[in-house]
Amino acid sequence: MLTVVRCLYRPGGAEERLHIRDVHVEYMIANRHLLEQGGALVSPEGAVEGMFLILRHDSRAAVEAFLAGEPYTRASLFATTTIECFDRFVPHADPHFLEKLLVAAREWIAAKRRKAGAKT
């Protein structure tokens, strides 16, 4: 299962993170088996605003345990943290997934139109 984690720093949090960045990076290395993707969220001006992760895990409890041990979380650097399940379409294990998705979408639309036409 994949989960998107989006953490936004509280005021001053982005600067404070620098003092424990080494511990954070060590934590990421130790947990890289969970990391599908990750990086900094930045403003259009290039200011670091937060952290974005895509985690591969078995349960939401595993994600919450990962975050509970994450150094930036433990240091209360984030104003907000969101956790959302993610169904990745691209890239997909099936190289024809998008084409199949297109066919399914068109079939659904056609069925809805037929049903709507039958009601009038």
Image: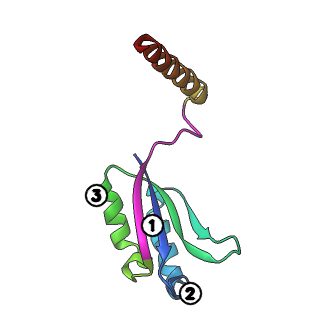
Q: Amino acid at mark 1?
A: Ala
Secondary structure under tag 2 reads: helix
The residue located at (64%, 72%) in the rendering is 43
Magenta-colored stretch includes residue 89:
yes
Residue at 41% x, 68% y is 81
The residue that label 1 is drawn on is 30
Instruction: Name the residue at 40% across, 14% down.
Output: 119
Q: CA distance from mark 1 to mark 3?
A: 18 Å
Q: Secondary structure at mark 1?
A: helix
Q: Is disc 2 surrounded by few (<14), some (14 to 19) or many (20+) residues within 10 Å?
A: few
Report the Cα–Cα distance between label 2 and label 1.
24 Å
Q: Quadrant location of residue 55?
A: bottom left
Instruction: Please give the residue where the numbered disc 2 appears in the rendered image.
Output: 15
User: SS for tag 3?
Assistant: helix
Residue that numbered label 3 is attached to:
61
Residue depth check, mark 2 versus mark 1: number of the one nearer the observer: 2
Q: Amino acid at mark 2?
A: Glu
The residue range painted magenta reads 79-93
Instruction: Give the mark nearer the N terminus: 3 vs 2.
Output: 2
Tell me what residue is drawn at x 53 percent, y 81 percent. Answer: 21
Report the colour scheme: rainbow
